Image: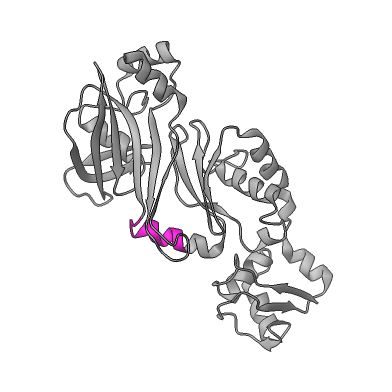
């Protein structure tokens, strides 16, 4: 017999979903058969599979070792990926951590989520960090794997929201979906911007080129986007802005600012190549000066008892550029 006590990281999900994570190689028909024959029970009682699990529930599986091992899969197969990411991805900082979530400050140049199997990303770093801290075990990863909840471009730095628990993941995704977490960015753009503004439109993406376009007219594949921006400091030929990402779509700020004639400095995809070359030579800048700098969370009772704002320090190059203009 195999017995598992449901923890806070696993509570709140249906039994059948929990079983699929526990035994990922087993077909659905196997679970239905075992539930029907009472070879899988919850708290010693017959279960149907649709029950929601609570903290402390005991899930018992009366299975032969060969059967369990054959359907279990190998969590340790990703061991090196977690360790490698935690050891090799340098500069990731922890801004805030509690029982349910973790906020990280990601440097430019690091993927939030892997694009191919061989990549190392913040997702793997997160699990590696939690394993090293003893907050999760390889056994617990079978039924819940902590992960990032928002994505930043590889060359955009700043705050990444991560869920440590299942309850935290559900609440964070709910808050993000309802736009109750306010997201602010710091950026340098070409030219002098003296007035604040609101940019709206409909964004569509070309998957082949990985570029987006923003139109004032609604299209079949277009999603409405809204960006607010505020000048922070003017220099002779650039401006430091703060932008609020009201909606959160791919390349939204980068494409929106390019439409205004004030593209982000260093942006190779939407920016001014000649203008960028000057900053590349002077500051060895090879990426856009865009930083996810602040998150404002509401009080929700689970993640935070009171509304709170979290700030990620800007990369050193931001200060270096500002100082050089003085």
In the rendered picture of this protein, how many numbered marks are placed on residues? 0
Where are the magenta residues, as a range?
171-180
- Could you tell me if residue 242 is visible in this image? yes
Query: Toward the viewer: 212 or 104?
Result: 104
Q: In this view, does 240 lie to the left or right of 193?
A: right
* Magenta-drawn stretch contains 177: yes
Give the residue displayed 45% in from the left and 58% down from the top: 172
Give the residue displayed 66% in from the left and 64% down from the top: 24
Q: Is residue 114 left or right of residue 281?
A: right
Above or below — where is 311 with respect to 316? below
Above or below — where is 179 with respect to 71? above
* Magenta-drawn stretch contains 127: no
Q: Position of residue 22 (x, y in %)?
A: 67, 66
Which residue occupies the extreme front position in the image?
306
Give the residue displayed 18% in from the left and 36% down from the top: 196
Which residue occupies the extreme right position in the image?
65
Q: In this view, does 29 lie to the left or right of 291?
A: right
- Could you tell me if residue 208 is visible in this image? no
Q: Where is residue 319 in the image (x, y as percent from the top left)?
A: 40, 23
Prevalent SS, magenta region: helix
Q: Residue 33 is drawn in which quadrant?
A: bottom right
Q: Where is residue 187 in the image (x, y as percent from the top left)?
A: 33, 31
- In the rendered view of the protein, which quadrant contains the C terminus? top left
Q: Where is residue 296 in the image (x, y as percent from the top left)?
A: 37, 50
């Amino acid at each position: 017999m195999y017995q598992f006590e449901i923890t806070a990281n696993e509570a709140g999900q249906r039994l059948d979903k929990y079983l699929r994570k526990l035994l990922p190689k087993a077909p659905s028909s196997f679970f239905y058969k075992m539930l029907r024959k009472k070879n899988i029970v919850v708290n010693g009682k017959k279960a149907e599979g649709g029950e929601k699990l609570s903290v402390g529930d005991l899930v018992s599986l009366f299975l032969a070792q060969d059967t369990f091992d054959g359907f279990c899969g190998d969590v340790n197969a990703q061991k090196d990926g977690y360790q490698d990411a935690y050891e090799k991805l340098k500069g990731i900082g922890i801004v805030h951590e509690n029982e349910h979530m973790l906020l990280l400050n990601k440097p430019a140049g690091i993927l939030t989520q892997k694009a191919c199997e061989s990549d190392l990303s913040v997702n793997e770093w997160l699990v590696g960090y939690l394993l090293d801290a003893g907050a999760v075990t390889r056994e617990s990863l079978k039924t819940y794997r902590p992960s990032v909840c928002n994505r930043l471009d590889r060359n955009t730095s700043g705050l990444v929201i991560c869920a440590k628990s299942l309850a935290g993941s559900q609440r964070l995704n709910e808050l993000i979906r309802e736009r109750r977490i306010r997201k602010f960015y710091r950026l340098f753009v070409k030219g002098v911007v003296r007035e604040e503004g609101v940019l709206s439109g409909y964004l569509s993406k070309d998957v082949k080129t990985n570029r987006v376009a923003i139109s004032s007219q609604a299209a079949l594949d277009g999603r409405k986007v809204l960006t607010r921006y505020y000048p922070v400091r003017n220099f002779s030929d650039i401006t430091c802005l703060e932008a609020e990402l009201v909606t959160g779509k791919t390349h939204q700020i980068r494409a929106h600012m390019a439409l205004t004639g004030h593209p982000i400095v260093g942006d190779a995809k939407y920016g001014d190549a000649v203008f960028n070359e000057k900053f590349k030579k002077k500051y060895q800048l090879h990426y856009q000066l865009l930083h996810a700098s602040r998150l404002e969370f509401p009080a929700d009772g689970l993640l935070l008892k009171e509304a709170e704002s979290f700030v990620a320090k800007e990369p050193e190059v931001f200060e270096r550029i500002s100082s050089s203009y003085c």
